[in-house]
Amino acid sequence: MIALQDRKLALWNIGVAYIAFLIGTLCGLLQVFIRNDALQLPAWLDYYQILTAHGVLLALIFTTFFIFGFFITGMSKSLGSFGPKVRLFSWIGFWVTLLGTVMATVMIISGQASVMYTFYAPLQASGFFYVGLALVIIGTWISSFALVGHYRVWRKNNKGQLSPLFAFMTITTIIMWIIACLGVVATVLFQYIPWAFGWTDTIDVELSRSLFWYFGHPLVYFWLLPAYMAWYLIVPKLLGVKVFSDSLARMSFVLFILFSIPVGFHHQLTEPGISNFWKFLQVVLTFMVIVPSLMTAFSMFATFEIAGRKNGGKGLFGWFTKLPWKDIRFTSIFIAMAFFIPGGAGGIINASFQLNEVVHNTLWIVGHFHITVGTPVAMTFMGITFWLIPYLTGRKFTKSMKVLGLVQIITWSIGMVLMSTAQHLLGLLGAPRRTAYSSYNDHPAALEWFDGILTNHVTMAVGGSILFVSAMILIYIVVMTMFLSPKAVETKDMVDFPLAESDMSNTPKWLENWWIWIGLAAALIALAYAIPLTHMIQNAPPGSEGFKTW
Amino acid sequence: MHLHKYEKIWLTLGIASLIVFLSVVGVSAFSQNHTPAGGMETIDPKKVNETAPFDNPGVTQLDDDTYQATIVAMAFGYNAPELRVPVGKEVIFKVTSTDVVHSFTIDNTKVNMMVVPGRITTKSYTFEKPGTYLILCNEYCGTGHHMMYTEIEVYEE
């Protein structure tokens, strides 16, 4: 077991993550009922307030705190206990992130920041909302640098050695995150904050959008890579085998540093100010991440087959039945991966240049990220939660918890299939995203969207309700394993951190030369962004004043 | 770096289909002009109503086969009087905003344009079927976002 103080640090991060999860999913439940015209909010509460809270708390806050809880535990386990400085800065990072979260949340709940988690200018929230967001990012940087510091100490003490795979993947994710955040930090510090506090009169809207999306796309990889870490490192251990290929795992991760950042324009394909050439170039770069994703898919299925055959699986597909389906830690992650197949395919559709026009800003997009971040990522985190919290608290993961965990995973899957299928289909028909209940004055075209067997508000509401029940079961499991379950006294009851062995004997050393990857990433970013952004700044129209349209 | 034989096959097939796919998208974009909405023109967002062509929004005929539809988007509606265009003719939509970001999205068509203040978004489209089409805003713009809509009538000549 890792040091008590490191456990405390990790548990506080995970605790905050699940408070955000609780509020965020409650907002989600309210949304499906408002859209079903079954619920009227009181006058002081607005649909778009709830929607903003749902997005910020689940997509940004739950994920970020959980990821750091996971990183802290894994780094302490694989590189040894934190030193006093690393611990101190991890706590500072935690409190700064939390302070930012509270500031932003208070602004949203008090109705001063109904601007969605994309906060597009010239919608102007209270300046403190942007300060809160900046603090969240800065807090994560402090936590990140603490982990990098811990890693550097290890490297100094283990000269010439490759680091353990968990540490390597954590550092990859952190490098990607820090480079990605430069965009949002630039726009929030130099554009939004001076403008929201009235120090400048106007803002360059298109530039702020471009800087946001420079950050916004790698943000999704910041969620995804920790999930991939569980797929590469935890799953093989649960199956009783080694990591399929250490070098391949490292290679696929560094490719994400290169190809997750210079791609933000694919979120801006239908807008002015960026010429088709640069849009298309970034579309091509976007598709490069398919390569490491294919590598990951191959590794996963190879791992499954090796494990299944080891357990006596015969024939072409016999191994499939020999996987440990009763192990909730495995089944949860397997279902998460299965959701990522349509999720990834949908992503390819969204980024496909002209095809984007069909789905851009429709409910399809909402469906898409509920089967990417909302299931593959979130359910992997749930699967991690089942062992991570008891591992950190030293409590048992009892039989009834295992049964509840299974119920939770299955209900989440059913709810998500119903809700996201309805959303995808509605989006294809043309129904827009981010709207309260509206029939556009009973326009026949709008009424037709919601008239299908699957394409109606009821399906979404049923799906959303099942999801909420599932979320509450999870909260129950979290509370039990954190505070109430009996302590594990005997060795057989102790919950382990299932970390697979990885054979590094064939892994080339250059994979861990970070300057190669940072340098290549910088070159690709310059290639994709330097000219169009320069052009955008030099040919900027007069800026926009702020508007509060809510 | 060692790669398993099946993995080599898998990645080769994957990368090959990626190249084919991107080539299809690229050829369609640049040799057949299938590109999404865009445009590089700028405008002063505070002077939209006095700047041509937005000082006189609506439909104008450019030549025998081409029409231009100019629309000003604002919270929460569109200033676009008499949106009527003939079927089978090219319509060039030009849209800008006087306040926040909106969209100009025509249901059941490929017209799905982000409208950014300070910029003019352009999209060319030819309607194939007559009828009344719903136009709506699909970018969140404030409390009345879900009330922001209008219609365009496509008539047969």
Image: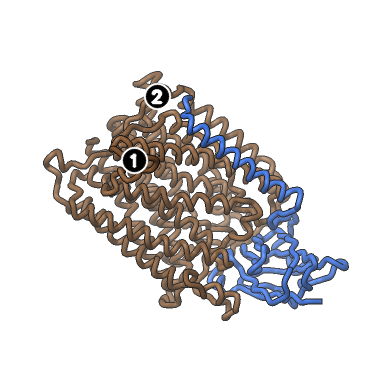
Chain colours: A brown, B blue
Crowding near pointer 2: few (<14 within 10 Å), some, many (20+)?
A: some
Q: Chain of mark 1?
A: A
Question: Which label belongs to residue A235?
Answer: 1
Question: Looking at this view, is A140 or B80 the one in front?
Answer: B80
Q: Chain of mark 2?
A: A
Question: Looking at this view, is A377 or A535 the one in front?
Answer: A377
Residue type at mark 2 is Leu
Q: Quadrant of the N terminus of chain A?
A: top left
Q: Are marks 2 and 1 on the same chain?
A: yes
Residue at the far front in the pictured view: A315
Sequence-wise, the earlier of marks 2 and 1 is 2
**At 26% from the left edge and 45% from the top edge, which residue is drawn?**
A387
Residue at the far top in the pictured view: A160
Q: CA distance from mark 2 to mark 1?
A: 22 Å
Question: Looking at this view, is A411 or B145 the one in front?
Answer: A411
Q: Residue B105, percent across and down?
A: 64, 66
Question: Which label belongs to residue A162?
Answer: 2
